[in-house]
């Protein structure tokens, strides 16, 4: 009986991973390409439209103002209604807005397009975190979130390669940066339609699992939920007041100031450091993504293996901070490019481990709401980062101050995370619950 249950557990976890993780990875790749393609478009767009660094920085950051509006409601909709329907709505609407961005001519139109894109995409990321908690037990969660978050650096790679090609086009009298938005707005609309048929909301609805596998996964997740409630049986509003939720929000916000400043400006940093053509700049900008994919997958795997979270989240931030602070004081081109690539890539490794931490605290609607709260407040840093870099660039005429800003944000965020202890309070309770029910516990 015990051996049979272990085998059922292994086959269920394997099937869930193979069925869901490649698809959610693909969705996040497309999501992030459409969010940050403006960073590559800016290699030509600002010159064509007469935008200053300050205008571009504000437009890049204003995305997050719209993004804040539906984060918490979006996560709750996934928890209480349907992930596949909500995700399909999000992707179709953000694809349409992305295409529309290709036709802007003024700063006001640019701001409006970025604001609408944020509104359209809001709820996607916390909704996907909630969705993964419906399918993966706590011991597999950092790996699962790594697979989702690997879409972020992968999007950097794919987006860079596409930008290198599209920026050189001039079809039908339209500049290549306009085609960048138009072409990259089509895939999310197609994937939105596919999502309606491919994703499965809950294990009990999964026809691709056997009946015993559906029962095993539902029982394991139910045991975890009961154990979490035993430790913290919070309502949504009580979750918003939990001290550890707010302790997690602060470093995420600070890290996001630096991360979004880096992501939206790194192609421009590379162009100004090297003086290379836009197509070659786009190819170089793919390298941090390659570094990020490797680091993210390894760090998530190692964190699950060791059962340790805070240092696996803090160390990548501290390493990225050192790279940017050294970059601010480096005048050798080869050394500067190496530090820029390393700093831009290493930081990705912290994300999946960080996001496994709040999943240990709460369950159901309280967890969904807290994920949305963390992401929405944290992403306000995405407004301040790109905007601040645009201001500093215009004010100083060089990138040194921006490098200091990014490096200090990473250093402070890493230091704060290193002090946060998020234990797994439900583990012992879940073990006792399974033992009382006569079930074996799998490590």
Image (spheres, rainbow, N blue to C red):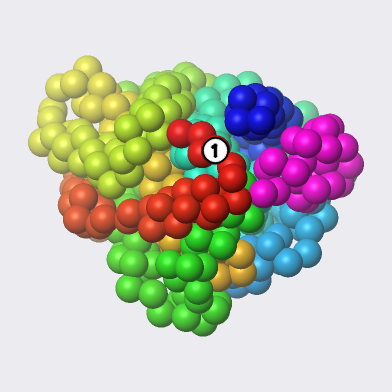
Q: Indicate the position of residue 429 as horizontal and vertical percent values.
A: 45, 57
Q: Which image quarter: residue 113? A: bottom right
Figure check: 370 above or below 144: below
Residue 143 visible in this rendered orientation of the protein? yes
Q: Is residue 55 left or right of residue 189?
A: left
Name the residue rendered at 55%, 70% in the picture. 366
Secondary element at image label 1: loop
- Image location of residue 1, percent across then percent down: 66, 30
The location of residue 371, given as percent across then percent down, is 52, 62
Q: Quadrant of residue 187?
A: top right
> Where's residue 25, x and y in %?
63, 34
Number of numbered discs: 1
Q: Residue at x 57, y 59 (%)?
A: 225
User: In this rendering, does residue 42 appear at all?
Assistant: no
Q: Is residue 172 left or right of residue 2?
A: right
Closer to us: 306 or 68: 306
**Main SS of the magenta segment?**
helix
Q: Which residues are magenta?
A: 195-219
- Picture residue at 54% right of the left edge, 79% below the top: 235
Which residue, as the protein is rendered here, is positioned at the far left? 329
Q: Is residue 51 left or right of residue 132?
A: left
Q: Few, some or many C-alpha atoms within 10 Å of disc 1 (few <14, some 14-19, many ≥20)?
A: some
Which residue is nearer to you in this view: 187 or 104? 187
Q: Is residue 149 magenta?
A: no
Q: Quadrant of residue 305?
A: top left
Q: In the depicted view, which residue is nearer to us: 103 or 363?
A: 363
Look at mark 1 in the image and give the residue it sits on.
Answer: 440
- Residue nearest the viewer, comparing 51 with 117: 117
* Residue 248 vertical position relative to residue 280 in the rendered view, above or below: below
Q: Residue at x 55, y 49 (%)?
A: 434
């Amino acid at each position: 009986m015990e051996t049979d249950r272990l085998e059922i557990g292994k086959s269920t976890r394997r099937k869930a991973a193979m069925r869901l993780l490649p698809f959610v990875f693909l969705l996040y790749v497309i999501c992030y390409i459409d969010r940050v393609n403006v960073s590559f478009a800016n290699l030509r767009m600002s010159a064509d439209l007469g935008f200053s660094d300050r205008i571009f920085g504000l437009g890049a950051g204003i995305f997050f103002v719209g993004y804040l509006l539906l984060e918490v409601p979006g996560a709750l909709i996934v928890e209480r209604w349907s992930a596949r329907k909500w995700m399909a709505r999000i992707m179709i609407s953000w694809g349409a807005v992305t295409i529309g961005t290709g036709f802007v001519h003024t700063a006001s139109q640019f701001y409006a397009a970025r604001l609408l894109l944020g509104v359209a995409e809001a709820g996607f990321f916390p909704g996907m975190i909630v969705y993964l908690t419906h399918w993966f037990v706590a011991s597999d969660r950092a790996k699962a979130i790594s697979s989702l978050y690997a879409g972020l650096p992968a999007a950097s790679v794919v987006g860079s390669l596409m930008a290198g090609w599209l920026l050189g086009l001039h079809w039908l009298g339209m500049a290549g940066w306009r085609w960048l938005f138009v072409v990259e707005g089509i895939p999310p609309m197609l994937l939105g339609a596919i999502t309606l048929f491919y994703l499965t909301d809950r294990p009990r609805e999964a026809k691709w699992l056997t009946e015993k596998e559906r029962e095993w996964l539902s029982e394991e997740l139910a045991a975890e939920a009961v154990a979490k409630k035993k430790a913290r049986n919070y309502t949504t509003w009580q979750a918003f007041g939990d001290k550890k939720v707010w302790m997690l929000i602060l470093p995420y916000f600070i890290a996001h100031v630096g991360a979004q400043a880096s992501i939206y400006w790194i192609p421009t940093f590379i162009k100004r450091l090297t003086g290379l053509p836009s197509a070659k700049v786009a190819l170089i900008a793919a390298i941090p993504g390659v570094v990020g994919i490797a680091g993210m997958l390894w760090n998530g795997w190692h964190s699950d293996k060791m059962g340790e979270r805070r240092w696996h989240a803090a160390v990548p931030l501290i390493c990225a901070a050192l790279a940017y602070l050294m970059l601010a004081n480096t005048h050798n081109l080869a050394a500067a490019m190496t530090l820029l690539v390393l700093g831009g890539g290493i930081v990705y490794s912290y994300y999946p481990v960080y996001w496994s931490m709040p999943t240990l605290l709460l369950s159901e609607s309280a967890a969904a709401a807290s994920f949305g709260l963390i992401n929405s407040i944290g992403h306000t840093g995405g407004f301040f980062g790109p905007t601040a870099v645009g201001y500093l660039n215009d004010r100083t005429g060089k990138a040194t101050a921006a490098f200091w800003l990014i490096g200090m944000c990473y250093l402070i965020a890493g230091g704060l995370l290193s002090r946060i202890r998020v234990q797994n309070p439900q583990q012992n309770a879940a073990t006792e619950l399974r033992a009382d029910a006569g079930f074996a516990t799998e490590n």
